[in-house]
Amino acid sequence: MKKILVTLFFGLLISTNAYSDHVPTAPKYLSADKKLHEKLQKLNAITDWTYECKKGDFIKHVAIDEGCIALQSLGKIDKLKKKLVVFLHGDRKSKSDYQIKKDYPFSKILKDEKENINFFYLARPGHKFKGRKRSTGKEKNYEQTGDWNAVYKKSWEAIRLSAEAIKKLKEFYQPDELIAIGQSGGAQTISITLGKMPGLIDKAILIGCPCMEGYPVKRNNPWEAPINQIGHIDPKTKIILITGEKDTETPAREAEIYAKKAKERGLNVQLHIVKGGHEFKSVKGRNDIINKALK
């Protein structure tokens, strides 16, 4: 009986660590470098603070416990519209304000469905849109560099700020369908959220997704790989992967592996390997694929 209990204990320990919500404090696979371990200790509660957000109007900002998450709308916003689309951008190192509509043009994509869709760009933690308060975050976007500071945008503790904002938008607008679109780091945010908050997102469009980046796939990265969350995704959620065949940052092979694993789990997945590279504007055929998915 004692052996059975010990086996069960370690079995639960392993299964819990596989889908941990936090950066592990002493992972065996990390370097023995003391400085790295000390940094991990400090990262345990990167969102353990509360800032008041007085600008939460669901048009320019969403108020969450930690502060404001900035929004930029496209087209007329009306609570009677049946679909809510939220776009999450990629990582950005520049100190200048994000001119999000210029970098990610969606007007043509939404043209046929603009009467049915409320569309928002969402500024990920630490990022700032022009004319908006910087989205709350432990570090500003241009400080989130290197494997360790990148935890402030790639770990669940950071990702959940965007996820909570999306949840609040859904509760406020009460759409028949919530569609989340993400490019690069934004795709990583969405793909992790699919597993951490199953059922929140009805349809996910992941462009240039770093789906294999993080532990346990890349064992020295102190954040979780999206592929590790596949087992928790709601089977009713539709996933569309779009990757440029010449993408060197998030190679097409990674999207292929993710799609294969997702299908093995019985998930509804489409994979599009198209001409182009990693940058959003270089991905050929993206407009047609997204437009079709929005209908």
Image (tube, rainbow, N blue to C red):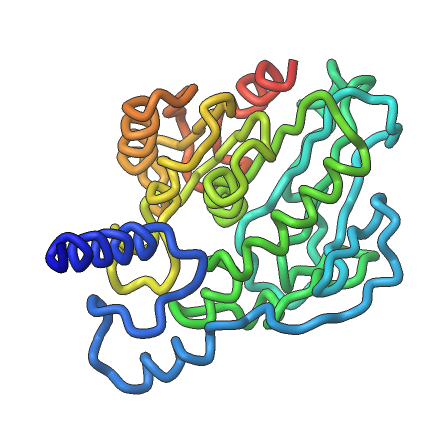
Q: Residue drawn at (59%, 68%), measured in percent from left and top?
A: 47
x and y, in percent, of residue 248 in the image: 33, 44
Q: Residue furthest left?
A: 3
| Left or right for 116, reference 1 | right
Residue plotted at (54% across, 71% down): 46
Classify the position of the N terminus by image quarter: bottom left
Q: Position of residue 119 (x, y in %)?
A: 75, 32
Of 252 and 34, nearer the camera is: 34
Left or right for 237, reference 98: left
Q: Residue 121 or 171: which is nearer the viewer? A: 171
- Residue sitting at 29 percent across and 74 percent down? 26
Quadrant of the image for the C terminus? top right
The quarter holding residue 84 reads: top right
Q: Residue at x 79, y 55 (%)?
A: 63
Residue 137, quarter of the rendered image: bottom right
Question: In this orientation, which residue lies closer to the viewer: 258 or 13?
Answer: 13
Residue 279 position, x and y percent, is: 49, 42
Front residue of 24/252: it is: 24
Position of residue 58 measured from the top left corner of the image (x, y, whole percent): 83, 45
